[in-house]
């Protein structure tokens, strides 16, 4: 007996992006009313001016549904065309049921493969890599990937080291087959020896060792981005847009500086969505991409380099051609 195997298309691309954020805007001055901090202190350390917090009755799944619907509209894709839904996240209120099946049902996507993926802040890049490979293997036709987080459920609201950083939101992409490559190979990995630098304190409060994470990210993530370029056969000078995980504006700037030292152009556009969205973990990269496209900072055909990194420690990146 010989098993039959499926074979998919040689290439994939992103067909559309979408995002969603809560309406409630929380400024640095707002936070200074409940903890020992101030606007200048926060701007100097992480670059955040404001962020969005969801209300108690606004769920991660709600934001994921809105972002997913917006991405399908942007892609011109009907729910009946999507056969797989992946929801990278690390902040569901319980381990089961997963978010993906609920999101798919509410979007009218019938009987899809549906699963959550937890690579924390690297989650969207992991999910995009998995989606692309599922399609190329013939296991999926069109995949909806939604990074969604409600971090305010898991952060001590008076912990100034963490509460000033994290926020809520969702960002999504529809991935489909393509005649020409639009998503490069994923460059991913992990540093499990550093697992204690980002963890759940008392099993309920997200906590990170800020200085340790900062040192790791500013030295180890640029090489991951360069590896993603190498795998895709793209020279640093060809990158039009850099979209790192929006963890800290100083980290973003450090990654950009290292890439420019390796040949990236001075006019390379660098995502700085953290200034007004905060750190939204697995949602940060697609959220930033959608905002940049809407603002006209990214144009069709641009070569975009993404790289995510976070708890695990996990990291991943790939080259994407803007649809």
Image (cartoon, grey):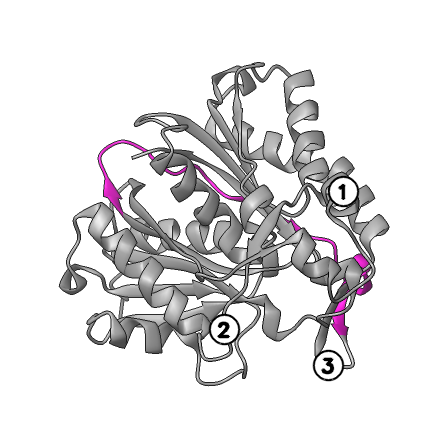
| Closer to us: 235 or 154 | 154
Residue drawn at 49 percent across, 22 percent down: 239
Q: CA distance from mark 2 to mark 3?
A: 22 Å
The stretch in magenta equals: 176-200
Q: Is residue 181 magenta?
A: yes
Q: Quadrant of residue 1?
A: bottom left
Which is nearer the eye, 243 or 316?
243
**Nearer the viewer's eye, disc 1 or disc 3?**
1
Label 3 belongs to which residue?
A: 203
Instruction: From the image, state whether disc 2 or disc 3 is nearer to you.
Output: 2
Q: Which sits earlier in the primary sequence, circle 1 or circle 3?
A: 1
Residue 177 can be seen, yes or no: yes
Secondary element under disc 3, as helix, strand or loop, is: loop
- SS of the residue under disc 1: helix
The label on residue 55 is: 2
In the rendered view, would you say 267 is above or below 181?
above
Which of the 4 image quadrants contains residue 205? bottom right
Q: Nearer the viewer, mark 1 or mark 2?
A: 1
User: Is residue 107 within the magenta segment?
Assistant: no
Q: Is residue 128 above or below residue 84?
A: above
Q: Look at mark 1 in the image and give the residue it sits on.
A: 40
**Residues at marks 1 and 2 touching, judged by CB atoms closer than 8 Å:** no
Describe residue 9's horizontal placement relative to residue 173 as left or right. Answer: left
| Quadrant of the snapshot with the C terminus | top left
Q: Residues within 10 Å of mark 3 (few under 14, many from 20)?
A: few
Residue 257, percent from left and from top: 69, 23
Looking at the image, can residue 188 be seen?
no
Question: In percent of the image, x 57 and y 37: which residue is there?
Answer: 272
Q: Residues within 10 Å of mark 1 (few under 14, many from 20)?
A: few
Contact between labelled residues 3 and 1, with CB atoms less than 8 Å apart: no
* Residue 103 spot, x, y in % from top left: 33, 72
């Amino acid at each position: 007996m010989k098993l039959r195997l499926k074979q998919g298309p040689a290439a994939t691309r992103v067909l559309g992006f979408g995002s969603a954020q809560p309406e409630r805007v929380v400024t640095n001055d707002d936070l200074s009313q409940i903890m020992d901090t101030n606007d200048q202190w926060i701007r100097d350390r992480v670059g955040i001016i404001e962020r969005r917090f969801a209300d108690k009755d606004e769920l991660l799944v709600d934001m994921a549904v809105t972002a997913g619907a917006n991405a399908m509209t942007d892609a011109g894709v009907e729910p009946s065309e999507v056969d797989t839904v992946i929801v990278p996240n690390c902040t569901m209120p319980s381990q089961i049921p997963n978010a993906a099946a609920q999101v798919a049902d509410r979007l009218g996507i019938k009987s899809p493969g549906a699963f959550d993926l937890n690579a924390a802040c690297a989650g969207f890049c992991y999910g995009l890599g998995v989606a692309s490979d599922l399609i190329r293997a013939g296991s999926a036709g069109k995949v909806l990937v939604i990074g969604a987080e409600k971090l305010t459920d898991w952060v001590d609201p008076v912990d100034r080291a963490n509460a000033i950083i994290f926020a809520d939101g969702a960002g999504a992409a529809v991935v489909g087959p393509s005649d020409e490559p639009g998503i490069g190979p994923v460059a991913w990995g992990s540093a499990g020896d550093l697992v204690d630098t980002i963890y759940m304190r008392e099993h309920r409060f997200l906590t990170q060792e800020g200085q340790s994470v900062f040192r790791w990210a500013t030295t180890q993530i640029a090489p991951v981005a360069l590896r993603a370029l190498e795998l895709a056969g793209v020279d640093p000078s060809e990158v039009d847009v850099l979209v790192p995980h929006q963890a800290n504006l100083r980290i973003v700037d450090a990654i950009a500086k290292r890439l420019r030292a390796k040949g990236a152009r001075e006019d390379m556009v660098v995502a700085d969505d953290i200034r007004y969205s905060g750190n939204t973990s697995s949602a940060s990269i697609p959220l930033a991409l959608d905002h940049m496209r809407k603002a006209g900072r990214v144009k069709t055909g641009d070569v975009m380099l993404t790289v995510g990194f976070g708890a695990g420690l996990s990291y991943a990146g790939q080259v994407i051609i803007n649809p």
